[in-house]
Image (cartoon, helix red, strand yellow):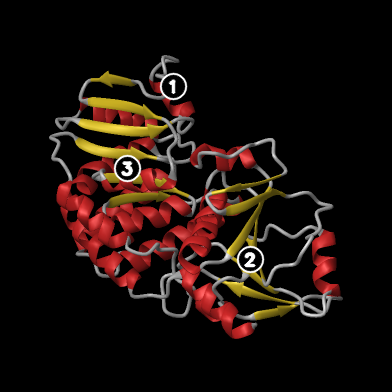
Amino acid sequence: MSGKRWDVFCRVVDNYGDAGVCWRLARQLAIEHGCDVTLWIDRLETLARFQPGIDVEATTQSVAGITIARIAEDAAAPLLPDVVIEAFACGLPPPYVAAMADARTPPLWIALEYLSAEPWVDTVHGLASPQPQLPLERYFWFPGFTHHTGGLIREAQLLEARAAFDGERAGDSALQIVLFCYPNRALPALFDAWSEGDERIRCAIPEGVATGALDQWLHGDVPHAGQSTVRGRLTLDLIPFSTQDAFDRRLWSADLNFVRGEDSFVRAQWAARAFVWQPYPQIENAHRLKLDAFLARYTAELPSRASIAMTAFWKAFNDEDGPAAVAAWPAFRAAFDTLGGHGRAWGETLAGLPELTAGLVTFAGRQL
């Protein structure tokens, strides 16, 4: 499918994660597979936070070899592509769908779904869904953690680059933490525990993240991006948003990564460090099913003590229960060496699964 035209549609729901996944996919299609890619997106300002060169006022532009177009409900494709990716059930503009239905040879329509470790994903990945009242089919593509799914996005030489980084990583006596989470009421209690503990901790927080907790804990004296504040044994560094490649390396430099949603969740797994995942909150706690399914899969080969410690801390943090998170912290911290080794083995296992972008290209090549 090299040289084919792909349209990727994205509407930003989960803050930066939707745009992050779609930008990585578009970039990999262009760079590694030679595809002509247009990314249709509704919030250019979100993309601009981590990708330099974005003009947030432009209707159409080209950045890093990718055409970027703003979604409008009356948008119609001037020239239909070979493949359409509808990311995360975002919906396609009605005129665009009408053009697909009228085409003598319509594009291949693939629905890129959210990542989940739930077993049912294996049974529906790759299935076709005929569209009511339209002569079109849409295929479901599920990222996942087994050979029966679409796997995860992994750029060529990513693990080799991380291994080289690990070999040159400078030591630091402070525990290095990256905190990239959704608003969480457990954080002030954790900040207290970290500041009053015996271990020096340095926590990097991207600008705009955990603002409520920081404001509460620092009594309104929140530093600006590029500044730090110290209380007891804890140093908080507010850092500007960076490119995706720089963010990956930030995760590689840490001892513990708090991540969220989907994009940073996957990158934390490639980082092979201890990590804490906060899934995007959903009504009726539907996100807890995803959390429990992933924990069950990830901890299956962990020694019981590390598994219990990790599970207890993750659940306390996701319950936003400050006292429970503080109580679970010492055992979780003691398991970091075990979790780091497990993370490396887990990453090697994931690298043996299908790679998401390559799988999409192969699938499209069979269908067209």
Residue sitting at 63 percent across and 83 percent down?
A: 367
Of 268 and 198, nearer the camera is: 268
Compared across the picture, whether 211 is left or right of 126 comes to: left
Residue with the most extreme bottom position:
366
Q: Callout 2: few (<14), some (14-19), or many (20+) C-alpha neighbours within 10 Å?
A: many
- CA–CA distance between discs 3 and 2? 31 Å
Q: Amino acid at mark 1?
A: Gln
Residue to which mark 2 is pinned: 6
Closer to the N terminus: mark 3 or mark 1?
1
| Quadrant where the N terminus is found in the figure | bottom right
295 above or below 64?
A: below
**Of callouts 2 and 1, the N-terminal one:** 2
User: Residue at the location (55% across, 62% down)?
Assistant: 114
Residue 250 image label: 3
Q: For numbered disc 2, what is the local secondary structure?
A: strand
Q: Earlier in the sequence, mark 3 or mark 2?
A: 2
Question: Which residue: 52% across, 37% down?
Answer: 49
Image quadrant in which you'd find residue 346 = bottom left
Q: Position of residue 128 (x, y in %)?
A: 67, 80
Instruction: Answer left or right for 52 relative to 108.
Output: left
Circle 3/circle 2 CB separation < 8 Å:
no
Crowd class of label 3 (few under 14; some 14 to 19; many from 20; radius 10 Å): some
| Amino acid type of the residue that numbered disc 2 sits on in the rendered structure | Trp
Report whether 144 appears left or right of 93: left
| Residue annotated with mark 1 | 216
Q: Nearer the viewer, residue 336 or 110?
A: 110
Q: Secondary structure at mark 1?
A: helix
Pinpoint residue 64: horizontal percent, then vertical percent. 52, 50
Callout 3 secondary element:
helix
Q: Does residue 118 appear in this view?
A: no
**Spatial separation of the CA atoms under disc 3 and disc 1:** 26 Å
